[in-house]
């Protein structure tokens, strides 16, 4: 807090002279700022002078009254930082502006003080107070700037989400898609994969974005992503890595105006991967019939009722079905099934025969093989 009376002879007159020149100082300061700080140079002076004068007036009033900033002062300074943020001025440049203002105020203070014969000790004390006040004002402006940054980021995020939704859900026209994609630096005449993934507690949204390799190359974006209904969805110009720590559904590469169909397939792929507890990147062809198992629950229920329900439940049934599943997965090779399950081949033969007898089916019949496989896969879906 500046208390002129306690600073010795000439301190009050010096400060009053400094405060009286506030309006002229603001104009002079804006001129210097537009020369030395790039973003300010791109803003018209009439967009800078009023807000600059308002912020400096708060500082000058504090100096004149010999007091600290009150809540209203801090709010006004925060508003100044918020305005600068909306004008596109970075926080570093806001800080640079306050540092420049501090230097200019100190220069004026020393020049006026020496002209009026104010002692060096008084000038030093007043300089320290001015710097402290400027630092407090700068921090208050920074808080306001952070508010503006958050609001701008939220608007940009909403705009990006609207664009991604419009493309993937087919609600935007090709002309609109082209215009908005080009606004993001994305080429319209390229093929893109639609994708859908689901963040988890272990893999949050930022981790997932990094894993999907959405980082621009040489300043050129590789795609766009947004959070929709809890899932990270979007499109990329490359196939993401296959060993991702969460299930990711990937659609075929198509032009932007056809991404709706690609996204529909990506959604089915992700839904299937989740249903079977599979991680990594999956496309529909690579999943075979599993998407049909997940989608057609009526058939799955019928297959379970036909082939699995008659067996009952319990550890013995689980062992029996586990053997049948491995048997089908190993091309119905008894030796390979036995090796994989660490069983004697006769034990495998016994279990297969028992399953066929209890279900009144033959695992040498192609239709029965498919239906039993379907029942076993649907059972996994039900268990999850």
Image (cartoon, rainbow, N blue to C red):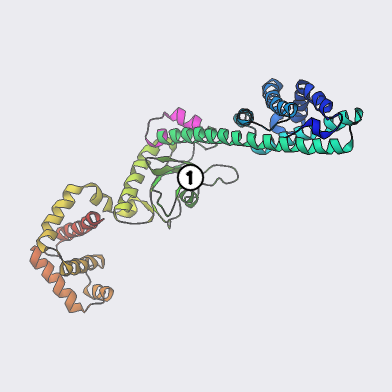
**Position of residue 24 measured from the top left corner of the image (x, y, whole percent):** 78, 21
Quadrant in the picture for the N terminus: top right
Q: Residue 66 or 318: which is nearer the viewer?
A: 66
Number of marks in the image?
1
Q: Residue 224 or 86: which is nearer the viewer?
A: 86
**Position of residue 354 measured from the top left corner of the image (x, y, whole percent):** 11, 70
Residue 249 falls left or right of residue 29 = left
Rendered image quadrant of residue 321 = bottom left
- Residue at x 15%, y 58% (from the top left corner): 367
Q: Main secondary structure of the magenta part?
A: helix
Rendered image quadrant of residue 148 = top right
To which residue does mark 1 refer? 237
| Residue 289 appears anywhere in the view | no
Would you place residue 30 above or below residue 221 in this image? Answer: above
Q: Which residue sits furthest front?
A: 6
Rendered image quadrant of residue 114 = top right
**Position of residue 298 measured from the top left corner of the image (x, y, whole percent):** 16, 47
């Amino acid at each position: 807090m500046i208390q002129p009376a306690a600073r010795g002879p000439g301190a009050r007159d010096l400060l009053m002279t400094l405060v009286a020149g506030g309006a002229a100082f603001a104009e002079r300061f804006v001129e210097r700022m537009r020369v030395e700080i790039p973003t300010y140079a791109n803003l018209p002076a009439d967009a800078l002078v009023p807000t600059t004068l308002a912020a400096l007036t708060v500082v000058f009033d504090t100096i004149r009254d010999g007091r600290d900033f009150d809540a209203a002062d801090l709010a006004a300074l925060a508003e100044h930082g918020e305005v600068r943020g909306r004008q596109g001025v970075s926080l570093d440049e806001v800080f640079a502006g306050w540092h420049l203002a501090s230097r200019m105020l100190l220069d004026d203070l020393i020049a006026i003080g020496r002209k009026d014969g104010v002692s060096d000790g008084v000038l030093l004390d007043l300089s320290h107070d001015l710097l402290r006040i400027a630092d407090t004002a700068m921090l208050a402006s920074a808080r306001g700037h952070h508010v503006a940054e958050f609001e701008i980021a939220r608007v940009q995020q909403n705009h990006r989400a609207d664009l991604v939704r419009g493309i993937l859900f087919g609600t935007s026209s090709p002309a609109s898609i082209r215009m908005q994609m080009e606004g993001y630096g994305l080429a319209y005449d390229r093929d893109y994969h639609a994708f859908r993934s689901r963040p988890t507690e272990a893999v949050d949204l930022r981790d997932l974005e990094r894993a999907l390799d959405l980082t621009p190359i040489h300043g050129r974006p590789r795609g766009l992503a947004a959070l929709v209904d809890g899932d990270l969805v979007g499109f990329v110009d490359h196939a993401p890595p296959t060993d991702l720590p969460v299930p990711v559904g990937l659609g075929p590469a198509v032009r932007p105006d056809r991404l709706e169909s690609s996204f529909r397939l990506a959604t089915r792929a992700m839904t299937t991967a989740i249903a079977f507890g599979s991680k990594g990147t999956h496309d529909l062809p690579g999943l075979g019939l599993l998407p049909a198992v997940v989608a057609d629950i009526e058939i799955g229920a019928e297959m379970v009722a036909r082939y699995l329900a008659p067996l009952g439940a319990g550890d013995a049934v689980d062992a029996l079905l586990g053997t049948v599943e491995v048997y089908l997965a190993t091309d119905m090779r008894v030796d390979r099934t036995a090796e994989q399950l660490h069983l004697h081949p006769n034990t495998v033969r016994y279990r297969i025969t028992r399953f066929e007898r209890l279900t009144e089916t033959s695992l040498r019949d192609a239709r029965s093989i498919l239906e039993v496989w379907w029942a076993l896969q649907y059972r996994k879906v039900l268990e999850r």
